[in-house]
Amino acid sequence: MAGLPLAPASQEAFEDAFRAHIADIKALGPDIPYTESVARLRSLLQSGILRHTDIRNNPERFLAAHRLLAEFATSLGPGFWIRFTVHFNLFAGTVMALGTPEQVALLDKIQAEGKVGCFGLTEVFAGVNSGLVVNTTATWVPEKQMFSLSCPDKGAFKNWISQGLCADLCVAVADLRVGGKSHGPHAFLMEIRRGGGLADGVGMGDMGVKTIGNDLDNAWISFQNVLLPKDSLLGRHGYIEGDRYVQRQEGIRTMDMIGQRLYTGRTVIARSALVFARTLYASTQGYTDQKQCWAPKGADLKLSSIPQLRSLFREADAKLSHVERFVGEVERRLADCLRAERLPPGDLVEAVAAAKVKSVELAIDLCWRLKQEVGSYALMTGCGFEQMDYLQCCKFAEGDSRILMQKMSRDRLRAFQKGGAIPANEAELCRGILDAGKRGDAAKEHEQIYGLAEAIIQRTVEAFVAPVAKL
C-alpha cells in the first residue's frame, strides 16, 4: 500500500506486531476526551498494521485485531473498541462489500491520510426493538446529475452514530429513489466534513453523557438536501445510467450485502464478550489468590479457596472454554466466506446470531455472579467491574439479543408450519407456541418463543463444537 509500511508476513507475526502497536492504549484510560481517542485511531490507521482490505484479504487478522483490543475492555470500557470496529467493520467493510473497484481503491488513500469514518444506518425511529427502518431518502436529481440526501422528519435523523462528531467521512444508508420509485436502502460514501466544518446540509449534535464509554463520541445526524455526486453511490451491485437505476445482478440485494457487516459485527462482539469475561475472571482471581482470609488455628486460607469461589472459577472456565470453541469455529467458517466474498449460508448466519446471544448472555451471567462473591473489591475503581456496561453495549449492538432470538424462533416456526424436518424437541416447542397463540395466551406464547430460541442455540453450539472436539 502506497504511503504505508508493509504488514507482517504471518498471522503470528501480525498478532505480535499488533499487540506491540496497541500497548500504549491501555494507559490512556477511559476518561480521555474523545478527540484524543480518535487521534489514537488515526495513528493506528496510518501505521498500516491492519489494513482496510484485511476484512477480505486477511480476515483472520481483522478478527484477531478485535480480539486483542478487547483485552483492554475491563480497563477502558467499550469506547475505543467500538470506535475501532465502527471504522474498520461498518465503514470500511461496507465500502469493501458494496464498492466498485475504484471506490475500494479509495480506502488506501483514506488510510494513508488517517481519515476516519462513521456508519449512518440507525435512525431515531429504528431502536433495538423495532428492527431495521430506513426513512432517510437519496433522490436522484436528473437535472443536476446528483443525489439529494434528506431526512423527511426528525424520526429519520441518524441516531447514536458512533464517531459521528469527529468523522471525516460517512457511509450513509438511505432509501434510493429514482424517477419516483423506491429501490430500497442503499449506501453512499460521502464527506461529512469539508474545510474544517460540516458539509452543507449536514446537521449534528451530541447524544450526551453516558454511563460508560465517554471517550467515544455518539452523535445524531440530519441531512437536508445534501447534494452527493453520482459516484457516491456504492455501486458494486447497482448504479445510475440514463437517469435509471440499473441492478448489476438479479437476486443480489444491496441490503443483503449491508447485512454482511452485521454478521462480522456480531461475530467480533461475541468474541469480545468472552474476552471481557476471561479478563475479568483472571484479574479477579489474581486478587483472590493473594487475599488472606481468617481460618481456625491460623491456617493459610486464601479467598480463592473458599468453596463458592473455587466452584465458580471452575464452572466459568468450563463454560467459557466450550463457547470459545464454538465461536472459533464460527470465525473460521465466516473467514472463508469473507475471503471468497460470498454470503454466508443459512446455517452459518444462524450460528453467528447464536454466537452473539450465547457469548454475551454467558458473559453477563458469569460476571454478575462473580461480582456477588468478592464483596467490596467489586466496588473499587480499576478492578474491572465498573466497566460491566461494556456487556450491555454488546447485548444490543448489531442486533439486540431478544430480537435475534425472536427471529430464530420465527424462522423455525415457519419451517415447522411448512412441514420441514426439524428436531423433535423444537417441533414440540413449535406446537406449544402455536397452541398458546390459538388460546390467546400471550404470556405462554412469549415464554415458549424464547424457550425455542434457547433450544436452537444449544443445538447449534453443539453441532459446531462437535467437529472441533474430534480434531
Image (cartoon, rainbow, N blue to C red):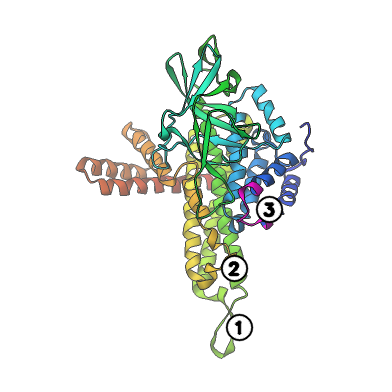
Q: Residues within 10 Å of mark 1 (few under 14, many from 20)?
A: few
Give the image location of residue 295, x and y in percent: 54, 85
Name the amino acid, label 2: Gln
Instruction: Describe residue 7's horizontal placement relative to residue 215 as left or right.
Output: right
- Which callout, 2 or 3, points at the residue further toward the start of the chain? 3
11 to 144, vertically: above or below: below
Q: Which numbered marker is on residue 346?
A: none
Q: Secondary structure at mark 3?
A: helix
Q: Which residue is mark 3?
A: 25
Name the amino acid, label 3: Ile
333 to 209, vertically: above or below: above
Name the amino acid, label 1: Asp
Residue 32 drawn in magenta: yes
Nearest the viewer among 339 and 69 is 69
Q: Quadrant of residue 38?
A: top right
- Which callout, 3 or 1, points at the residue further toward the start of the chain? 3
Nearest the viewer among 443 and 465 is 443
Q: Which residue is mark 2?
A: 285
Q: Which numbered marker is on residue 300?
A: 1
Can residue 448 be seen in this snapshot? Answer: yes
Instruction: Describe residue 401's horizontal placement relative to residue 105 as left or right.
Output: left
Give the image location of residue 120, x and y in percent: 52, 34
What distance separates the C-alpha of mark 3 from that of mark 1?
Answer: 38 Å
Per the rendered image, the range of residues in magenta is 27-36
Nearest the viewer among 28 and 256 is 28
Marks 3,1: beta carbons within 8 A: no
